[in-house]
């Protein structure tokens, strides 16, 4: 697909993060599935993940810049 080693790493990392978030924070469909798709053409690779959960804005109980309980720099 024309990605160099860094581009491949970044793509895999993004896919992993999207799937992990769907599993941890989303909801499966009526068959227990989360939907994944990948489309490639000459200029781009597009990955999408779809879950069936609904977004609820979390209540902030820590610093606005915190990330999973750790302060961001």
Image (cartoon, rainbow, N blue to C red):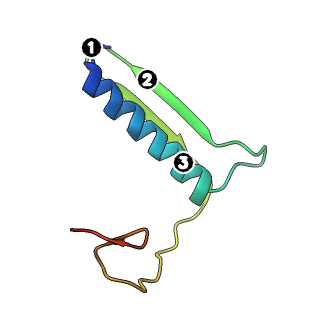
Q: Which residue appears at 47% of the width and 26% of the height?
A: 38
Query: Residue 37: x, y in percent?
Result: 52, 30
Q: Quadrant of the C terminus?
A: bottom left
Question: In this orientation, which residue lies closer to the viewer: 62 or 23?
Answer: 62
Q: Residues within 10 Å of mark 1 (few under 14, many from 20)?
A: few
Does residue 69 appear to the left or right of 64 in the view shown?
Answer: right
Query: Residue 9: x, y in percent?
Result: 34, 29
Alpha-carbon span between mark 3 and mark 2: 20 Å
Kindly identify which residue carries mark 2: 39
Does residue 43 appear to the left or right of 30 in the view shown?
Answer: left
Query: In what element is the residue under mark 1?
Result: loop
Kindly identify which residue carries mark 1: 2
Q: Earlier in the sequence, mark 1 or mark 2?
A: 1
Query: Residue 20: x, y in percent?
Result: 54, 48
Query: In what element is the residue under mark 2?
Result: strand
Q: Quadrant of the N terminus?
A: top left
Q: Which residue appears at 52% of the width and 66% of the height?
A: 55
């Amino acid at each position: 697909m024309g990605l160099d080693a860094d581009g491949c790493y970044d793509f895999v990392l993004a896919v992993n993060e999207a799937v992990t978030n769907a599993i941890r924070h989303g909801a499966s469909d009526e068959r227990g599935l989360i939907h994944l798709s990948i489309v490639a053409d000459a200029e781009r690779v597009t990955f999408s993940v779809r879950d069936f959960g609904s977004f609820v804005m979390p209540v902030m109980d820590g610093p606005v810049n915190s990330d999973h309980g750790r302060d961001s720099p």
